[in-house]
Image: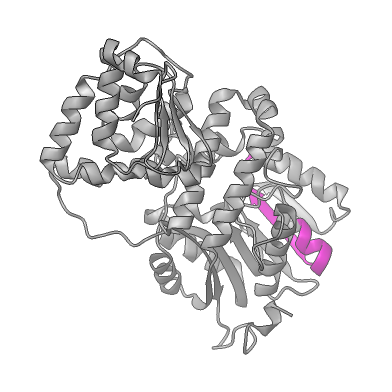
Amino acid sequence: MLTAAAPAARAGSPALRAAEAFLARLFPAPRRFDVRLWDGTVLPAQGEPTFTLAVNAPGSLRRMFRVPLALSLGEAYVRGDFDIEGDLWAAAPGMEAYRDAVRSPADVLGVAALWRRLPKDDRDGLAVDEARIRAREGSREWDLQGIRYHYDAGNDFYRLFLGRRMLYSCAYFPTGAEDLDTAQELKLEHICRKLRLREGQRLLDIGCGWGGLVIYAAERYGVRALGITLSREQHALATDRAREAGVQDLVEVRIQDYRDLREEPFDRVASVGMFEHVGRRRLPEYFTRVHALLKPGGLFLNHAIGGRPGPGRSVRRAAEKVLNERLVGSAEFRRRYIFPTGGLVSVSEANLEAERAGFEVRDVENLREHYARTLQLWAGGLDANRGEAVRIGGMAMYRLRRIHLGVAAWQFLAGDLNLNQTLLAKPDGGRASVPWSRADLYD
């Protein structure tokens, strides 16, 4: 049912009638969100709305729902074709409800016919810069360009929402009630305890970000730490922060690829949020190289996002492929606009490759809910600093990061993504540096 002003508009506007018919078919009752069209017409939810979908221009719906669906919605959001009034992680399930309307090829054809009747316009919207990596896939230059595309957006931009220690990885919420800064410090402590750090040990942090772990481990545990990153922005700030913390004699930060390290083996190695940039094809190389960098008896903590194990490969018809595409949060959208290199694998696949490289799996912890909460807090921080974020990075950058954080929070809440901390040991004659139980982690 429309608002009071809508019947006259509906009667006199083919564009509005086409939009209403398309939305009614794509999101059949009961639709749990309001829709506000470009002229102010509201199509109310059936029941209490969870969010409002604001369609900003006559041609927006055509751009939002064109094939491939896995790209169009995210691109349309970043360009300003529509807005979500409410939390993105609450809106994502409602937007995914279109699946109920396209369960067969006949359904797809019916929706497509209505889509072709939608109005067009000449609105360009905000420009969206796609990552263009000009290097051989899997090469060091490929990794370098991919990392810098995402992380060199600027330290001032990330400082707006990552928290005091600027940790761009899942925080740890023992009760779920902790604030972001507390939970991030607890995450660092959790990692250090899992690694069973002791004073004087040598720690390598692969993909050290802005230096949070190496600085914390040097301050609290007295280890000698080397952090490596490919980001110039991260390297500069991490070096300054180690000096400010007074641990510059214990902490070194370099711009270096882990494959180029030629150091004496380390007592402990951590990789926190870097594994996602490796990719399936290079897993054997990754684990073999880390194994070589670790002393016998040493421990390696791999903290990584993982996806669900995928189905076997098959050839699908075009219509079936459309039906199986995700409307939001697609891997292709992430690859083009968020993380252009690497990719996600399941924890089972990752740990199988680790074992093949000679590691022994000693502990696995899934922190999926913790990452959902982390992303929600980051999204809240970004929204709270919207004006400054737009000033630093522009509106397109703000909107790109907003949809990434919000949809990723939903993917973790829904179980589409996981965050696993895996503790791996390099046995020394059958001996590993772990105690009989996990009790020491929680003392």
- State yes or no: residue 388 in magenta: no
Q: Position of residue 166 (x, y in %)?
A: 71, 47
Front-most of 25 and 57?
Answer: 25
| Residue at 42% in and 14% down | 124
| Residue at 70% in and 62% down | 188
Q: How is the image coloured?
A: one colour
Front-most of 275 and 75?
Answer: 75
Res. 160 image quadrant: top right
Res. 440 image quadrant: bottom right
| Residue at 46% in and 34% down | 52
Q: Position of residue 8 (x, y in %)?
A: 33, 14
- Residues rendered magenta in the picture: 215-231
In this view, 156 is above or below 103: above
- State yes or no: residue 217 in magenta: yes
In this view, 340 is above or below 196: above
| Residue at 58% in and 30% down | 398
In this view, 246 is above or below 424: above
Front-most of 235 and 296?
Answer: 235
Q: Is residue 317 left or right of residue 217?
A: left
In this view, 128 is above or below 26: above
Q: Position of residue 301 (x, y in %)?
A: 59, 67
Please identify the quadrant where the C terminus is shown.
bottom right
Residue 245 seen by the camera: yes
The residue at the far front in this view is 4
Residue 139 seen by the camera: no
